[in-house]
Image: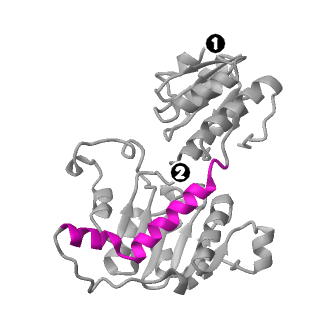
């Protein structure tokens, strides 16, 4: 049995090598290149494909895999919105993902960024770098005095809720699907609008779907409290960037922490050599602001999470090849 793993980064390689040692009955081929029309031919002869990327898994790529007789595609990430579902079905390709590689990693990072915003640490970093050790006027807020609205209460949202509670914050939440334990606590509100109206901090943990694209837009921001904080470690397409900039300019939004960006593909995880060479003016606009924290999609990026992404995807692909089943199958 043979599995080809695409897009293997240097930090993933030790975990892939370890998995290969522990699964000597599998021939593992790996490449640092992403799976696209220029590399798909490398999969010929494999029984399954493991991959991770932000660019689309196009119909042309999936048709080619189907022509090779490959029926198993395992993603090392959660999102499957970049998979051409019709092409996958047409070629009878089963797709798995890694629904939970480390919810705690993302939740911890989200709250870390919020605390940086509330305690004005970017401003103090700048002041101290310039020899200014004065406190005023940059007085902070306390999380224990705030209401945090959590949008989506899946694994990551629930992990974040536990941390917010640990700080003593009041937590409310919105989700179409109510978690039974959270339901008992009575934290759910009835609508996104109610969540917006009552929250001092909005913590977004929703997947990217057609229905929620640009869910945070001018209309949504207008329904929020003045001075709200926006946290998005989920998907860039959830936020209308132009509307966010307008709300920051007006002061409606006191601060934002963005680990994702709607035009991040080809930009994040790239070294441009200097700030000026970053080819996105809206992104640079946000990065220049002391009340906006932009990070290049690193909330997940811990040793535990990377190990789990490799192991869970490889295990799922092997299981599909051997049995045609996996507990991580995605319904496209």
| Mark 1 or mark 2, earlier in chain | 1
CA gap, disc 1 to disc 2? 32 Å
Quick one: label 2, few (<14), some, or many (20+) residues within 10 Å?
many
**Colour treatment of the image:** one colour
Q: Is residue 102 magenta?
A: yes
Q: Secondary structure at mark 1?
A: loop
Q: Quadrant of the N terminus?
A: top right
Give the extent of the magenta segment.
Answer: 100-129
Q: What label sits on residue 300 in the rendered view?
A: 2
Answer yes or no: is residue 44 visible.
Answer: yes
Q: With respect to residue 323, does 311 lie above or below? A: below
**Left of 310 or right of it: where is 226?**
left
- Which image quadrant is residue 65 in? top right
**Left of 132 or right of it: where is 242?**
right
Q: Is residue 206 magenta?
A: no
Relative image position of residue 92 (x, y in whole percent): 74, 28
- Which image quadrant is residue 288 in? bottom left
Q: At x 46% / y 70%, what residue is drawn?
A: 114
Task: Judge by depth and name the residue closer to the eye, 181 or 86.
Answer: 181
Q: Secondary structure at mark 2?
A: loop
Q: What label sits on residue 45 in the rendered view?
A: 1
Question: Which SS does the magenta portion mostly show?
Answer: helix
Q: With respect to residue 83, does 157 lie above or below? A: below
Q: At x 57% / y 77%, what residue is drawn?
A: 167
């Amino acid at each position: 049995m043979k599995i080809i793993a695409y897009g293997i980064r240097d930090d993933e390689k030790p975990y892939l090598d370890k998995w290969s040692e522990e699964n000597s009955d599998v021939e593992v081929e790996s490449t640092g290149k992403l799976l696209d029309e220029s590399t798909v031919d490398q999969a010929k002869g494999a029984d399954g494909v493991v991959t991770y990327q932000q660019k689309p898994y196009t119909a042309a790529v999936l048709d080619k895999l189907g022509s090779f007789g490959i029926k198993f595609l395992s993603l090392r990430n959660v999102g499957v919105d970049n998979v051409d579902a019709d092409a996958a079905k047409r070629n009878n390709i089963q797709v798995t993902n890694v629904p939970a590689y480390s919810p705690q990693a993302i939740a911890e990072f989200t709250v870390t960024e919020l605390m940086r915003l509330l305690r004005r640490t970017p401003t103090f970093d700048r002041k101290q770098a310039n020899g200014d050790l004065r406190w005023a006027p940059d007085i902070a807020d306390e999380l224990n005095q705030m209401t945090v609205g959590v949008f989506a209460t899946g694994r990551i949202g629930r992990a974040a809720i536990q941390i917010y509670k640990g700080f003593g914050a009041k937590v409310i939440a919105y989700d179409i699907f109510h978690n039974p334990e959270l339901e008992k606590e009575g934290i759910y509100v009835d609508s996104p609008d109610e969540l917006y109206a009552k929250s001092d901090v909005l913590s977004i943990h929703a997947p990217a779907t057609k229905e929620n694209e640009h869910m945070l837009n001018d209309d949504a921001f207008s329904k929020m409290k003045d001075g709200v904080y926006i946290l998005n470690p989920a998907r860039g397409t959830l936020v209308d960037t132009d509307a966010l900039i307008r709300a920051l300019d007006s002061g409606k939004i006191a601060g934002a922490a963005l680990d994702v960006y709607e035009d991040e593909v080809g930009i994040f995880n790239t070294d441009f050599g200097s700030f000026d060479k970053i080819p996105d003016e809206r992104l640079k606009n946000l990065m220049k602001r002391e009340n906006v924290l932009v990070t290049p999609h690193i909330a997940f990026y811990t040793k535990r999470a990377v190990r789990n992404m490799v192991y869970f995807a490889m295990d799922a692909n092997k299981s599909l090849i051997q049995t045609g089943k996996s507990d991580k199958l995605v319904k496209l």
